[in-house]
Image (cartoon, helix red, strand yellow):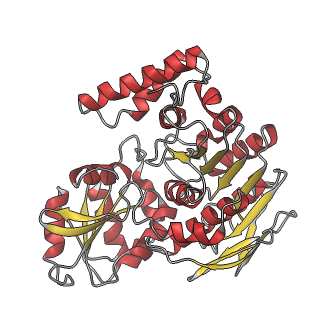
Amino acid sequence: MSAAHPSPSAALPARSRLAVATGRAVAGASQLVHFGSGSVIGGRAALLVDRDLLRHLTRGREVVLVSATNGKTTTTRLLGAALGTDRPVVSNSLGANMTPGIVAALGPADPAATAVLEVDERWVEQVLAQTGAGTLVLLNLSRDQLDRSQEVRKLAERWRRALTATPPERVVANADDPLVVWSAQVAPEVVWVGTGQDWTADAAGCPSCTGRIAFEAGHWRCTACDLARPEPHVTVDDAGVTLPSGRLEVALSLPGRVNRVNAAFALAAATALGADPSAAGAALGQVQEVAGRYRVARLGGHPVRLLLAKNPAGWHEAIDMLTPAPAPVVVAINARIADGHDPSWLWDVEYERLAGRLVVATGERRHDLAVRLRYAGVDHVTVEGVEDAVARAAQAEGHRPGAIIDVAANYTAFQEYLEMVGGPR
């Protein structure tokens, strides 16, 4: 690289430059031996050299953090597209959302680029303190991986503590999630997004006083204290998003109501950062898949669409995206570390909504799923391998020859199938 075009890391302290170089070398070696993408292990190696690397890589840079239990990868991708209409953007767009993955994404990036970073909900406090991010986007909090994660109220407490200790210039937050509202209300400026969220199972108790949250159509409030739904600045419907600057019709390529909500968060944050609403909205429509989610591919000679659903709230939305009955569906459940070893959450998913079709259960915990489907009164079979499961779905009475078969999987099963069809793009 010539002197006229210095390396992005040229302005970093010497130790940080060494850390970036070390991380890239380790990541490259990892890829060479086919040990994954190498980004996380490269980031870990870089942090061993310079534990303050994240602080150095974000100094003087516009930083936007996106966190939630569900939807953060998609919202990060959409926000990056929206902001990319008028500025350079760097992002950890494939979902490596803890400090090692973040520094791996930032290390080789243009130091002038706006950083749009997905952050695991348990890491918000640490990453916010190290980056001093100007904007924080908070989508939702729900139960996930309870064998290794804290209860959602504890996560809400950590978010509130983070916003008190290191307040960003603005927070873009979900007005329909009481846990998010309680966390975000301590921030100096909040852009409230009305999402129409109808998953309320994780917020029955008030995070402020432990009273009861009463949910009504378009509103919620605590029956024992003054915590209540704030008036939203941004709202979303089937055709578009209403921003403080006016209504904008948005034609998304991504399916489902949940992605219209993700788009509303992306537009709210992008326009707050000065992006042109029309250009940003048009950019959202160009996003057709996110880290393999919604990809149409072939498995075992049959066309499939890959859907990711990791926890009860995620399945609540994913079921709405499925091809309507009587079309069959393949559902894959694992219970590895990244999924959470405890699959008891299956009983919190309304699998009764899958009635009227054949469900082909696969994955390592297919028999647990089969028990749940039996109690739900859903016609099902268990098949060990995903290609055989897809072939069995193609034989179902409700399948039209040549039609795309939905394969809905939790995290590690989804990643395995995505690798089978060509990996992330």
Residue 371: % across, % down: 31, 64
The quadrant the N terminus occupies is: top left
Q: Does residue 161 appear left or right of residue 79 in this picture?
A: right
Percent position (x, y) of residue 125? 68, 38
Q: Is residue 143 above or below residue 239?
A: above
The residue drawn where x is 87% and y is 62% is 225
In percent of width and height, residue 199 lies at 58, 69
* 379, 176: nearer the viewer: 176
Q: Is residue 364 visible?
A: no
Q: Can you say whether 22 is above or below 411 in the image?
A: above
Q: Can the viewer see residue 45?
A: yes
Residue 67 lies left or right of residue 176; in this view the side is left
x then y, percent, for residue 116? 58, 48
Which image quadrant for residue 210? bottom right
What is the count of numbered marks? 0
**Quarter of the figure with residue 130:** top right
- Above or below, 119 against 137 in this view is above
- Which residue shows up at 40% across the image and 52% down it? 343
Residue most extreme to the right: 226
